[in-house]
């Protein structure tokens, strides 16, 4: 790997910056996406934020208060040389992503993870170190990395992917593999930026592999690029990239997002589906194919030139079928069925689980002419069960950055304040992309 010049590094690392990436809602095709079937997802207004600021010594510090993680390493303990010798370069001289995590790199990092007992902390530190040692060189000074998210963690809304995109983009900036984000909210990206986004997307997929084992890539694709997409993983042996098709005129869908608050792990759920499909390949081949057909049909409906009540009704049919197929894959949960029962009882619309399932969130595509009193009754009953409803919007911006040199309010980059926001509203108010015109995008 070529090392970057110290002058360039100095300019990119001296002042603090924040990166942010959105969560996502999978509308059709979770799990089947892992097996190369098309799926549809949109970026969510809930986001992850990562503050990067210089440390006054050679330490690399992680402060992830959402998961109560605080850990640091001495920069000189990172085996940069050994890892660099294992990293291949692409045709532009940048570190090249591999199909799978490289076991020798994981082995070289394992002594740095020895004292970390919690599984969640271990995974988060492993993800960070894997990306750090691939993307950053030993000339980069010690830095502090602080993550805050307005997303519920482990609830099906892509909290791992948005964290991974934040880490990949920040480390790509520190490694000088991408330039500063420069576009304001409404400006279109240039070809160069599209290429840099691709780099971030690819490395965030490596981060997702550290979190999940076998991700399709849909979550990090949406967190990187934003908007709404139809995504199809390439599962062939031809090394071709996955296909991401932007859905430009994504219809204004009224979606109610309900978090059962039942914790679960995407890695375990994806693993469970893997075992089932291996045990009964002929049965599940057809289930997965049906899920793919359903996404294609939904895409045709969503992109029709005249989206009206009839099209909304058809999407609701497909939501119900998709949920049934996910039940067949064994990834529902009594709490998710409860959300569906309550939604159906008050006739508010069609409900399915979203993300990996097993708890976490459900979406309801609310009827166009919903009776608002019935909707309120359903939401009251959700809260009686301890479920939490979110007021969110879909299809927003992908990964972006906020630079201290562009902002007069230095407080935004104070680690203490960043860690101290009490809830998602305070985070949104201080940092939200809608509240700060200085956010820049690639
Ligand atoms: N704010 C955060 N701070 C630190 N780590 C986080 C944060 N958000 C997510 N993570 C990491 O992501 C893991 C949760 O990822 P997981 O894939 O299981 O759920 P999810 O991404 O929320 O849901 P889904 O994959 O179904 O969309 C956590 O265990 C943690 O390691
Ligand atoms: C369950 C899954 O399909 C979606 C998780 O948000 C896994 C993946 O596609 O990586
Ligand atoms: Mg995840």
Image (tube, rainbow, N blue to C red):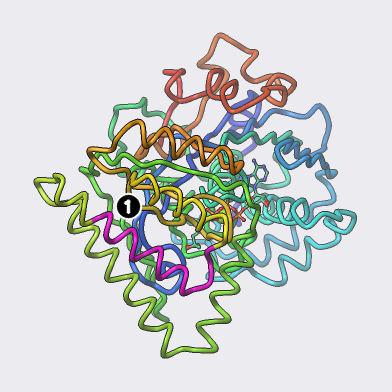
Q: Is residue 287 left or right of residue 63?
A: left
User: Dot 1 corresponds to which residue?
Assistant: 229
Label 1: few (<14), some (14–19) or many (≥20) C-alpha neighbours in 10 Å: many
Q: Is residue 330 left or right of residue 243?
A: right
Residue 28: horizontal and vertical position, in percent? 36, 59
**Residue 203 visible (yes or no):** no
Q: Is residue 324 magenta?
A: yes
State ligand 3's quadrant. bottom right
Farthest-out residue, right: 115
Residue 1: horizontal and vertical position, in percent? 61, 57
Relative to 14, residue 216 above or below: below
For the residue pair 436 and 276, the one nearer the viewer reads as 276
**Residue 55 visible (yes or no):** yes
For the residue pair 247 and 302, the one nearer the viewer reads as 302
Q: Is residue 374 left or right of residue 330?
A: left
- Overall secondary structure of the magenta section: helix
Relative to 252, residue 209 above or below: below
Q: Secondary structure at mark 1?
A: strand
Extent of the magenta region: 315-332
Q: Residue at x 57, y 60 (%)?
A: 334
Relative to 5, residue 335 above or below: below
Residue 362: horizontal and vertical position, in percent? 47, 51
Residue 408: horizontal and vertical position, in percent? 55, 9
Quadrant in which the C terminus appears: top left
Q: Is residue 318 magenta?
A: yes
Q: Residue at x 30, y 27 (%)?
A: 186
């Amino acid at each position: 790997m070529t090392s970057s010049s110290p002058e360039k590094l100095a300019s990119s690392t001296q002042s603090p910056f924040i990166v942010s990436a959105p969560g996502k809602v999978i509308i059709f095709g979770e799990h089947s996406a892992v097996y190369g079937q098309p799926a549809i997802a949109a970026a969510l207004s809930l986001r992850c934020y990562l503050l990067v600021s210089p440390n006054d010594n050679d330490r690399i510090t992680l402060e992830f208060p959402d998961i109560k993680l605080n850990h640091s390493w001495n920069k000189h303990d990172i085996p940069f040389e050994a890892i660099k010798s294992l990293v291949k370069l692409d045709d532009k001289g940048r570190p090249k992503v591999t199909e799978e995590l490289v076991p020798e790199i994981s082995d070289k990092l394992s002594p740095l993870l020895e004292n970390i007992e919690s599984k969640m902390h271990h995974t988060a530190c492993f993800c960070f170190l894997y990306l750090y040692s691939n993307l950053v060189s030993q000339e980069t000074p010690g830095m502090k990395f602080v993550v805050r998210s307005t997303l519920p963690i482990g609830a099906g809304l892509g909290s791992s992917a948005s964290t991974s995109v934040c880490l990949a983009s920040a480390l790509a900036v520190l490694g000088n593999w991408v330039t500063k984000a420069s576009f304001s909210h409404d400006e279109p990206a240039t070809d160069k930026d599209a290429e840099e986004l691709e780099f971030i997307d690819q490395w965030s997929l490596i981060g997702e592999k550290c979190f999940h084992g076998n991700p399709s890539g849909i979550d990090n694709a949406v967190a990187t690029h934003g908007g709404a997409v139809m995504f199809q993983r390439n599962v062939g042996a031809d090394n071709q990239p996955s296909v991401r098709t932007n859905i430009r005129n994504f219809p204004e869908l009224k979606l109610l997002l309900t978090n059962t608050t039942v914790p679960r792990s995407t890695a375990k759920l994806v693993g469970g589906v893997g075992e089932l499909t291996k045990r009964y390949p002929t049965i599940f081949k057809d289930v997965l194919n049906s899920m793919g057909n359903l996404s294609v049909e939904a895409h045709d409906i969503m992109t029709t030139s005249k989206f009206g009540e009839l099209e909304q009704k058809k999407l609701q049919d497909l939501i119900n079928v998709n949920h049934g197929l996910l039940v067949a894959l064994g990834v529902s949960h009594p709490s998710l069925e409860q959300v569906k029962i309550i939604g159906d009882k008050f006739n508010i619309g069609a409900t399915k689980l979203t993300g990996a399932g097993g708890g976490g969130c459900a979406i309801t595509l609310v009827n166009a002419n919903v009776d608002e009193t019935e909707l309120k009754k359903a939401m009251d009953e959700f809260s009686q069960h301890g479920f939490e409803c979110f007021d969110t919007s879909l299809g927003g911006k992908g990964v972006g950055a906020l630079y201290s040199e562009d902002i007069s309010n230095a407080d935004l980059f104070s680690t203490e304040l960043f860690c101290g926001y009490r809830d998602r509203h305070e985070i949104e108010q201080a940092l939200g992309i809608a509240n700060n015109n200085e956010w820049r995008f690639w």
